[in-house]
Image (spheres, helix red, strand yellow):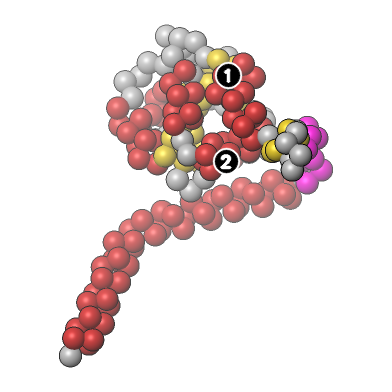
Amino acid sequence: MTQAKSPDVSEMTIRMDAISPDAEQQLDELSWESQKAVLRLLLERPVLRSDCKLVQKLSDFRVYRLRVTRSVRLCFIRVEQTHCIVSLGAKPDFENYCNTFQGSFPKSFVPLSESTVMKNLNSRSVSVTGNGHKQAPAAMPHKQPLDSSPVYQEAQRIAFVLTEFLETFMEGHQSKIDDDIVAHVQLMKDEVDK
């Protein structure tokens, strides 16, 4: 059985190194927009360690989550020196993973550079020019000055925390807002009927 460890706290950023076969399949089943967001996260920018949260239900197993988009979550573990993706999907899939996880991780992981799904997504994201020739995406420098700036990284962290706070805050009020909208629509219907 694979033994998960905590991410190295001395690192400000981390890099996802491998993916489980199940997570590869889950990635393949996501919408194209969500797949592009995963590609951007994994290939174009460093992942801030502060954006990685320990999944409370799975804290004994050292499973961490990372928000890819508003609705897509990525779960990963750290095995030896590599960060391995174990689950990837929409928020309900993330909740299902957390509720049904039995404590056993895959015995093997595929390096992201060798992942068939990642290779397919990379080739699919290559744009086609007007003359039909494929144009490779612009090469991104390994470290961009803005991304390595501590101020930029702190701003990213604060934006993430504020977004998480607002989502959590709104979860409790969303049903009340929905009820208010339905009530106002009903009042307007009654007025029109009169």
Q: Position of residue 178 (x, y in %)?
A: 30, 65
Q: Is residue 92 visible?
A: yes
> Would you say the magenta stretch is mainly helix, strand or loop?
loop
Task: Identify the residue under disc 1.
Answer: 115
Disc on the earlier residue, 1 or 2: 2
The kind of residue tagged 1 is Ser
Q: Position of residue 64 (x, y in %)?
A: 48, 31
Judge from the rendering whether residue 123 lies leftward or rightward of residue 165; answer left or right.
right
The kind of residue tagged 2 is Ala
Judge from the rendering whether residue 131 lies leftward or rightward of residue 4; answer left or right.
right
Tell me the crowding category of disc 1: few under 14, some 14 to 19, or many 20 or more residues within 10 angstroms, Cα based.
some
- Quadrant of the image occupied by residue 38: top right
Magenta highlight range: 138-148
Q: Residue at x 76, y 39 (%)?
A: 131
User: Up-down: is 53 above or below 184?
Assistant: above
Q: Position of residue 105 (x, y in %)?
A: 42, 16
**Magenta region includes residue 167:** no
Task: Identify the residue under disc 2.
Answer: 37
Tell me the crowding category of disc 2: few under 14, some 14 to 19, or many 20 or more residues within 10 angstroms, Cα based.
some
Secondary structure beneath label 1: loop
Judge from the rendering whether residue 110 lies leftward or rightward of residue 46; answer left or right.
left
Q: Residue at x 53, y 21 (%)?
A: 19
Judge from the rendering whether residue 29 lies leftward or rightward of residue 100; answer left or right.
right
Q: Residue at x 36, y 56 (%)?
A: 171
Secondary structure beneath label 2: helix
Q: Residue at x 59, y 30 (%)?
A: 121
User: Up-down: is 186 above or below 89?
Assistant: below
Q: Nearer the viewer, residue 111 or 57?
A: 111
**Magenta region includes residue 147:** yes
Q: Position of residue 189 (x, y in %)?
A: 22, 80
Q: Is residue 42 visible?
A: no
User: Up-down: is 192 above or below 30?
Assistant: below
